Image: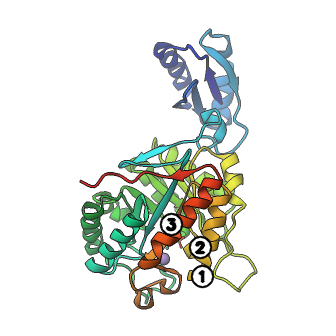
Amino acid sequence: MMIVMTEDATDEQIAEVSALIEGTGAQVHISRGEMLTVIGAIGDGEHDSRVAGLGLEQLASVDRVVPIAKQYKLSSRQIRGGEDSIFDIGGAKIGGGNFSLIAGPCTVESREQLLTAGEAVRAGGASMLRGGAYKPRTSPYSFQGLGKEGLALLAEAKVETGLPIVTEVMDARDIEDVLEVADVIQIGARNMQNYPLLAELGRAGRPVVIKRGLSATLEELLMAAEYVLKEGNESVILCERGIRTFETAYRFTLDLMAVPVLKEMTHLPVIVDPSHAAGRRDLVEPLSLAAAAVGADGIIVEVHPDPQNAVCDGPQQIETTDFADYAAKVAAAAALAGKTLADQPQRA
Ligand code: PEP
Ligand code: MN
């Protein structure tokens, strides 16, 4: 259930309504928009009927009580009264009118590789730096990431470039280490339905980007977000990264329709990963332009100083020397959709 407060509802009245809802056993989630405060009463069907039984609509501070028909509740656009969520990640904004370029290598390989990529993406206008220290690889015989050594290099790159770090965690036992450096924790496509891991990250409180599973529906993606949001972590970013279809001519099928449809369903920012969808460098730019044009809130793209010799995903990584030109074109496409490149945080 969603309790929409009147425009002039006071903090005391909001607290009073919250306490009544808590008395039913439902979880309270307060969302303060520019004009209105919406109180979400989150629980199962039984909670809903108990909240309905409170007769909250009779209070002077309550404008209306609306049931949330969808399975996903905290991620629904409705709960924020139609407003977009905007997160400030170490000075880099994501969501709303901001277009975020998140760029960097697939995996952290060395100090030189990471810092070269980091400086290039900063110079090209990226507002965050990506790079995996723990890699989900299809084969257990492939390189699995540098682990803690990779995290230490990311910490160094964060200081050098001033860019917030986006990096993946695959195992809840690594969360503590990853929290030392990550500004945004990435949940890979293969872990989208790892519910205990999602809940753990909900409790960790750090912003999370959840990549859509290879065969997940949009509703399943939103339910994954719900696992994080339910624990009180409000900062969830969704990422379309290509899904499995019958087509074999490219690695995955980038489902760009997911962008406007998700934006209709949810208040959370939606970004696109053209690199993993395509698997091929030549497709990355056209897919990025298309993603920006359909209204994505940003792009997460792989960039490497020497893709020919990259440890993983070489064929899809764009060269650092090509990044600035690529970024300018993507920014122009984002402008068509009414978004401007997110400001970069100041360097310390
Ligand atoms: C990645 O971003 O490095 C990655 C492995 O992506 P995905 O989980 O989408 O395959
Ligand atoms: Mn990769």
Viewport quadrant of the N terminus: top right
Horizontal and vertical percent position of residue 125: 43, 61
What is the distance, in whole Å, between disc 2 and disc 1 at their CAs? 7 Å
Residue 195 shows in this picture: yes
Disc 2 residue: CB within 8 Å of ligand 2:
no
What is the distance, in whole Å, between disc 1 and disc 3 at their CAs? 15 Å
Query: In this rendering, which labeled residue sits more in front, label 1 or label 3?
Result: 3
What is the distance, in whole Å, between disc 3 and disc 2 at their CAs? 9 Å
State the SS at label 2.
helix
**Along the polypeptide, which appears first: circle 3 or circle 2?**
2
Horizontal and vertical percent position of residue 251: 63, 81
Residue 168 shows in this picture: no
**Along the polypeptide, which appears first: circle 1 or circle 3?**
1
State the SS at label 1.
helix
Rate crowding at label 3 as few (under 14), some (14 to 19) or many (20 or more) other CA atoms within 10 Å: many
Disc 3 residue: CB within 8 Å of ligand 1:
no
Viewer-proximal residue, 171 or 206? Answer: 206
Tell me the tag on residue 327.
Answer: 3
Q: Quadrant of residue 34?
A: top right
Contact flag, marks 3 and 2 (Cβ < 8 Å): no
Viewer-proximal residue, 146 or 141? Answer: 146
Q: Name the side, left or right, on which 192 lies relative to 170.
A: right
Viewer-proximal residue, 253 or 283? Answer: 283
Q: Quadrant of residue 247?
A: bottom right
Contact flag, marks 2 and 1 (Cβ < 8 Å): yes
Amino acid type, callout 2 = Glu
**Residue receiving disc 2:** 285
**Which residue in the rendered view is the most extreme toward the top?**
60
Amino acid type, callout 1 = Asp
**Residue receiving disc 1:** 282
57 is higher (above) or lower (below) than 345: above
Horizontal and vertical percent position of residue 313: 49, 83
